[in-house]
């Protein structure tokens, strides 16, 4: 949509990009409710240019117009930019609890943290590294930890990239219907599994760690070879009790 | 429903229009909704020649002016649609610009516009399908009765589709509209190829008076009305602020191109000896086809026009239902109309009520012995009043709205002001030319207006609190914001 752009920005798209980022930064700094005119004044932008950029960012849902229609806040879509790069802290006490579980089971134990739209491994098993390609964080539909996040979302399809679901192995669920059914099961049982869906030989089980309000804050993932999947599932109660102990430490 | 968060008191947890299938509809169905509401095929078949007959040599500047006014209105509408995801369309916009009482009058005007255009389109489906059956030798003698049956059947079909969901109904209208445009393009192409291309300007009125030119302008404008109807899909569209604004901008372009194609083809074949033969009939294109000895194409035209009107019925009713739904959620109309279907997530009671209304009115008109074509004209004029009223309101409201929210724009003031003046002047000039008498549309719109004002006064007196709720829209809820400071996200409890 070039028609709606300010003339100066159309000449120099990089100018519009910097202004847009400055607007985002300013709203993040001032907190929800800052008005378009305040933004224009503070950043020294011509009002018409500022309003156009702001409305564009609101249209893209990086910003949100507050219900009074005057103020702005950072929108949920901006989450994708910010949360995955912020380093979350795992307290020492929590690390000890996780190490305790690792000592009890003969499986890899990882802990991930969740934002509303993404997940991030925060404590990976030193004996069983996750692999360099971050599959667990990139393919939510195929990973047990990812399914926990999707099952918790109101509109899970929006958390996945548009287009057909990527087939990583022969076992990956790529039909929207079968994935939806699996997520309904995850919601009901509060545990997610995958067997050979993310990598051909690996099975996983993930249980949620929830805050007192019920929000999904983190998850424990147990993983091992596919042929030991039944043994993996027998550790469900241990994983859950560990999650309960971790809840006050991670939320 | 009005539950609010602790830290940011103005942000709700739950959308005031919860129950609809929010933020799902892709851009194509949103555009289809707006384009279908303008009934492009029916416009292609009728409007260019009608405008030519009234404005004569001034037809081109008149059409250009009409398009310019439409673009000004588009500018005003998108000032709102880029900033709020409304369910009540122009009604909700005016509420934010001018306040509750002007909004209610606009809402009434919009309801009148959408309802009357839905009624007339439904009637037109009956008229053209019945003519289609007649030409194929399928119909009996009782034409009035036949039209009535088709109206009821088409109304039931429209109602069912609307309850099933906005996605289904807009995709159906899209397909129907495409078929219809394809049919009429075939006919126009055939006319251009076969007919001798001799335009006789002399056959048209050489001198025209101001009111007839103005009427031509209003008719040209009427070819575009409905383009704003995507503004009632704010809750259901994905990325609504972009999608709705885009649909409102693109619809006049789509309709305009089709209009221009039809105008070129029709003017090229306009070989009329007596000037008025085709110019004043209800569907000039059919007469053109017959005059050029291409009668075989006429059933195609009948069918295509009926299809376009069916799409227009569904699109207008979708808009109508959402305005009514919005008013009900605000407490202006009974709460039952604001309920949504558990599975289909559509306002099914509002659909039911509006379908009954839209089917009943033409059936009653037919039962009272009114000729279908006469009823059609009456309803179309009524809808034009309704639409023009709401357009004027939104043009006045746009600069006020921008002032209110602190995003003042002189450009919008100029656009809104110019559009308001031209719209009012054209309407006045068009009315001025016709002898002032109490025609059915005048009486009907007068009665509706009086009833509406009484209803507003009653609301003010008995329930002033409800007026405050007016202007409800699908505002940002807590889940749309990036983590509110210090507040955990609500999740599903196991």
Image: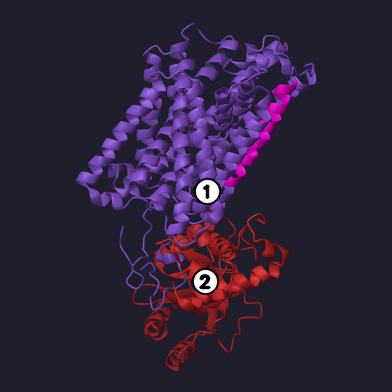
Magenta residues span B248-268
- In the foreground, B295 or B286: B286
- Which color has been applied to chain B in this rendered view? purple
Q: Is residue A139 magenta?
A: no
Q: For the stretch drawn in magenta, what is the main secondary structure?
A: helix
Query: In which quadrant of the rendered view does residue A201 lie?
Result: bottom right
**SS category of the residue bearing label 2:** helix
Report the quarter where the N terminus of chain B lies: bottom left
Q: For mark 2, what is the residue?
A: A39
**SS category of the residue bearing label 1:** helix
* Residue at mark 1 shares a chain with residue at mark 2: no
Q: Is residue A248 visible?
A: yes
- Which color has been applied to chain A in this rendered view? red
Residue A133 in the image: state x and y as whole percent: 66, 77
Tell whether label 2 touches label 1 (CB within 8 Å).
no
Residue B120 falls left or right of residue B53: left
Q: Measuring 32% from the left and 42% from the top, which residue is drawn there?
A: B337
Residue B399 falls left or right of residue B56: left
User: Dot 2, crowdedness within 10 Å: few (<14), some or many (≥20)?
Assistant: many
Q: Is residue B340 visible?
A: no
User: Dot 1, crowdedness within 10 Å: few (<14), some or many (≥20)?
Assistant: many
Residue B308 in the image: state x and y as whole percent: 57, 29
C-alpha distance separating marks 1 and 2? 24 Å
Q: Is residue B265 magenta?
A: yes
Compared to residue A51, the image places residue B100 above or below, namely above
Query: In which quadrant of the rendered view does residue B217 lie?
Result: top right
Which mark, residue B76?
1
Q: Measuring 51% from the left and 66% from the top, which residue is drawn there?
A: A63
Q: Measuring 43% from the left and 13% from the top, which residue is drawn there?
A: B145
- In the foreground, B216 or B366: B216
- In the foreground, A145 or B86: B86
């Amino acid at each position: 949509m070039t028609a709606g752009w300010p003339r100066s920005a159309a000449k120099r798209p990089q100018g519009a990009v910097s202004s847009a980022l400055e607007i985002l930064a300013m709203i993040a700094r001032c907190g929800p409710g800052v008005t378009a005119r305040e933004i224009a004044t503070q950043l020294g932008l011509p009002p018409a240019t500022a309003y156009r950029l702001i409305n564009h960012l609101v249209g893209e849902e990086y910003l949100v117009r507050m219900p009074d229609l005057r103020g702005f806040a950072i929108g949920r879509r901006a989450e994708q930019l910010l949360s995955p790069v912020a380093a979350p802290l795992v307290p020492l006490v929590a690390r000890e609890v996780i190490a305790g579980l690792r000592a009890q089971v003969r499986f890899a134990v990882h802990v991930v943290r969740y934002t509303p739209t993404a997940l991030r491994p925060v404590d990976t098993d030193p004996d069983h590294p996750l692999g360099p390609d971050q599959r667990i964080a990139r393919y939510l539909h195929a990973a047990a930890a990812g399914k926990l996040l999707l099952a918790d979302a109101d509109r899970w399809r929006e958390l996945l990239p548009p287009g057909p679901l990527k087939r990583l192995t022969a076992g990956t669920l790529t039909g929207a219907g079968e994935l939806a059914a699996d997520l309904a099961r995850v919601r009901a049982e509060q545990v997610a599994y995958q067997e050979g869906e993310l990598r051909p030989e690996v099975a996983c089980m993930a249980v949620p760690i929830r805050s007192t309000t019920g929000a999904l804050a983190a998850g424990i993932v147990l993983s091992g070879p596919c042929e030991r999947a039944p043994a993996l599932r027998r550790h469900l109660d241990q994983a859950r009790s560990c999650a309960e102990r971790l809840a006050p430490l991670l939320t | 429903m009005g539950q609010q968060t602790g830290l940011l008191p103005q942000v709700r947890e739950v959308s005031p229009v919860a129950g609809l299938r929010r933020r799902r509809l892709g851009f194509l169905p949103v555009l289809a909704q707006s384009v279908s509401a303008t009934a492009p095929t029916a416009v292609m078949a009728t409007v260019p020649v009608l405008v030519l007959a009234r404005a004569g040599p001034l037809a081109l500047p008149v059409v250009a002016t009409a398009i310019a006014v439409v673009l000004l209105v588009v500018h005003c509408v998108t000032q709102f649609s880029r900033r709020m995801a409304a369910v009540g369309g122009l009604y909700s916009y005016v509420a934010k610009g001018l306040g509750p009482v002007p909004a209610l009058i606009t809402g009434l005007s919009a309801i009148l516009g959408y309802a009357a255009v839905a009624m007339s389109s439904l009637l037109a489906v009956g008229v053209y399908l019945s003519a289609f059956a007649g030409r194929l030798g399928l119909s009996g003698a009782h034409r009035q009765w036949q039209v009535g049956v088709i109206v009821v059947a088409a109304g039931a079909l429209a109602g069912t589709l609307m309850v099933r969901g906005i996605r289904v109904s807009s995709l159906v209208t899209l397909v129907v509209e495409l078929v219809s445009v394809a049919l009429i393009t075939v006919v126009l192409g055939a006319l251009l190829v076969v007919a001798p291309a001799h335009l006789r300007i002399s056959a048209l009125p050489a001198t025209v008076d101001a009111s007839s030119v103005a009427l031509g302008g209003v008719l040209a404008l009427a070819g575009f009305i409905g383009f704003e109807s995507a503004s009632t899909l704010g809750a259901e569209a994905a990325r609504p602020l972009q999608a709705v604004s885009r649909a409102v901008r693109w619809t006049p372009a789509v309709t305009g191109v089709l209009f221009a194609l039809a105008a070129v083809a029709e003017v090229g074949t306009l070989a009329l000896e007596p000037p008025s033969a085709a110019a004043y009939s209800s569907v000039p294109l059919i007469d053109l086809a017959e005059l050029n000895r291409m009668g075989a194409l006429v059933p195609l035209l009948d069918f295509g026009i009926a299809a376009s009107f069916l799409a227009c019925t569904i699109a207008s009713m979708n808009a109508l239902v959402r305005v009514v739904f919005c008013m009900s959620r605000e407490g202006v109309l009974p709460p039952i109309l604001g309920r949504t279907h558990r599975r289909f997530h559509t306002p099914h009671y509002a659909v039911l009520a509006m379908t009954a209304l839209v089917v009943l009115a033409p059936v009653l008109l037919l039962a009272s012995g009114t000729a279908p074509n006469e009823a059609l004209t009456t309803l179309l004029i009524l809808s034009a009043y309704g639409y023009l009223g709401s357009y004027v309101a939104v043009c006045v409201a746009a600069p006020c709205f921008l002032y209110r929210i602190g995003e003042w724009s002189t450009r919008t003031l100029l656009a809104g002001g110019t559009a308001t003046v031209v719209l009012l002047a054209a309407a006045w000039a068009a009315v001025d030319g016709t002898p002032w008498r109490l025609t059915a549309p005048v009486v009907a719109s007068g009665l509706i207006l009086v009833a509406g004002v009484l209803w507003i006064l009653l609301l003010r007196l008995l329930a002033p609190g409800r007026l405050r709720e007016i202007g409800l829209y699908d505002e940002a809820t807590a889940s749309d914001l990036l983590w509110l400071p210090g507040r955990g996200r609500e999740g599903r409890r196991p």
